[in-house]
Amino acid sequence: MFRILKKILLFTGIGIFLLLLILPAPAGLGRPAQNALAVFSLCVSLWATNVLPMSITGLIAIAAIPLFNIAEGKTTFSHFGNSAVFFILGAFILATAMMKSGLSKRLAIVFLRQFDRSANTLAIGILLTSFFLAFWMPEHAVASLLFPIVLEISKSLDLKPHRSNYAKILFLSLAWGTVIGGVCTFLGGARNPLAIGMLKESYDLNIGFLEWMIAVVPVVLILLLFAYIVINMFFKKEIKSIDSASESLSDSVRKMGAFSRNELKVAIIVVVTIAAWIFLNKQLDIAVIALLSAISLFVFRAVTWKDIERYINWGIILMYGGAVTLGSTLAETGAMDWFARKIFSYVSLTPFSAVTVLSLLSKFMTEGISNVAAVATLIPLGFGIADTLQINPIIIVQVIAIQSGLAFCLPIGTPPNAIAYSSGYFSISDFVKGGIILNILAILIFLIIGLNYWNLIGINIQ
Amino acid sequence: MSTSGYSPEATNYAIRECKKNKSKLLACYIIDAEVPDAVSSWMIYVGFMGDEPSEDYKNVVLAEYKDRAQETLDEVTQMAESENVAIKTFILEGSLVENAIKIANENSADLIVINKPQQVDFGRLLHGSVMETLKKKAPCPVKIID
């Protein structure tokens, strides 16, 4: 079924691309803007179907813009040097240092040990540890880091795959805690800096590291509470004693040994970097701070270049650079504004209903395609809608980036879900039944509480 | 049996059939690496992680699957021996259908007993029902225990 859907999506995208290139441009839409829409259609279908690596689709976007006379090569390539791309680069190097030095594992186990008093507190501990770690590291790195720890806990408690409700609670807590935590900062998921990079390129507006956290964390905490309730509503734990799990955690601490010099170096650099992102936001671009942090790791010999090469897929630069370039070109040519005006000549929407529609679209897309692809696709459309309905583009960025990050239903929604699912302890139906409720709650919480709270802190919808 | 699921009902049925026909039980556990493979390459191409963390993750999952396979086969061996049924065990990695057919062919099996998978994985979503394919390609009858 998925294979057929994938083919339909791919051929529709290519079909629209060819049609838009051939057909004359309608009134109000220039040739460059129509070609930009054509390239957008092609890239969306390629990102959504993963027929080509996402990084290569990024390159297609960059090459196609001058090729189809949408913008000059010089202008196109200049968008590639967006600060979001360099921020992501620095943040990934920092995450690598945390993983390679063992600091992230130590943090996870030490944090988790504070909760090993009962079956209930241990499950809460996994939810909170994954949530908290995803503030500071990419969420898939957090999930793959915590996965062997949770697996060890499950084995020590002799939990049986598919049969143990407690194992389901632990692995769903790992997946959903990571997913929810990943939307809280710019580090959990690179889609947030991507969305902010597109905002900066299109409107010259910025959202700071702390500003984002102030806007998102309080609302997300409500969702985290609901995640705990939903997990425990569907799965009643069958065990009472977790003594063997506590022993297993103590063993892990013993095996890690004393805090190493390298861990100390990385810890200091991480703390200073985060403090700089929070307090020097006005003075220094977050990308500059990220790069200085990456440089410090090498200066103090906390990582080697070989480590970085083994831990990062450099395609990330091409994918993000391509997405920012395409988004900026769509904004500059006015293509998305025209498209949004066209939609609203048939449908009448208020700003609130437009935000609701974008939330739903983000949610649907992110369950089927990678959340980065969902952001790269929806932000240009959202900006077009924002211009037409006079909506604050910051609201658009927050809504799309957050909802695109919150995929709860399917393993293919996001890597943490897939990693937890591969444990074999639960089935897709276990995922879906709680995931649907959490998806609905995520939309309602952000539309009802989120928008009102953002209004209170000065981020108005219009 | 496979990483997609194991049911004692299917095992009991196979042991009863072997006892009735005085035949040998070939207990085969297939480790399906499709899910960790898919997740690992996904971490690289969608999550933009490097090879090392993706490989580490995959090794953890496969080691877990192998442990699980051995535990399950030990359990099945005990069940068969308590019924005086001769048993030979296999742990194989790869496609459930191909491996089941290979073992059936090599050992001239009279019947394949399989439990309906509890886990629908990426491959199954993409490639359709494993049970249907096995039924079509198997050299002997296939009994599916739900």
Image (spheres, rainbow, N blue to C red):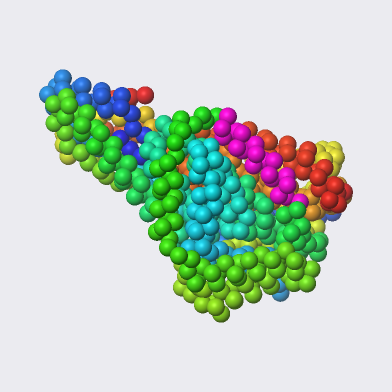
Q: Is residue A102 left or right of residue A30?
A: left
Residue A9 position in % (x across, y down): 59, 45
Quarter assignment of residue B55: bottom left
Residue B88: tell me if it is visible: yes
What main secondary structure does the magenta stretch of the protein show? helix
Is residue A261 part of the magenta span, yes or no? Answer: no
Q: Position of residue A85 (x, y in %)?
A: 65, 66
Q: Report the residue at 13% width, 26% height from top.
A: B84
Q: Residue at point 53% right, 37% down?
A: A120
At x 51%, y 29%, the residue is A236
In this rendered view, identify the residue nearer to me: A153 or A198: A153
Total marks shown come to: 0
Residue A38 or A359: which is nearer the viewer? A359
Q: What stretch is highlighted in magenta?
A: A215-233
A275 displayed left or right of A145: right
Q: Please give the name of the residue rendered at 78% of the width and 38% of the height, measured from the top-left corner.
A: A448
Nearer the observer, A55 or A283: A283
Instruction: Answer above or below: position of A333 versus A74.
Output: above
| Relative vertical location of residue B137 with respect to residue A87 in this rendering, above or below | above
- Residue A430: where, in percent of width, then height? 51, 33
Q: In which quarter of the image is the N terminus of chain B?
A: top left
Q: Position of residue B93 (x, y in %)?
A: 30, 46
Snapshot quadrant of residue A352: top right
Quadrant, the C terminus of chain B: top left
Q: Is residue A225 magenta?
A: yes
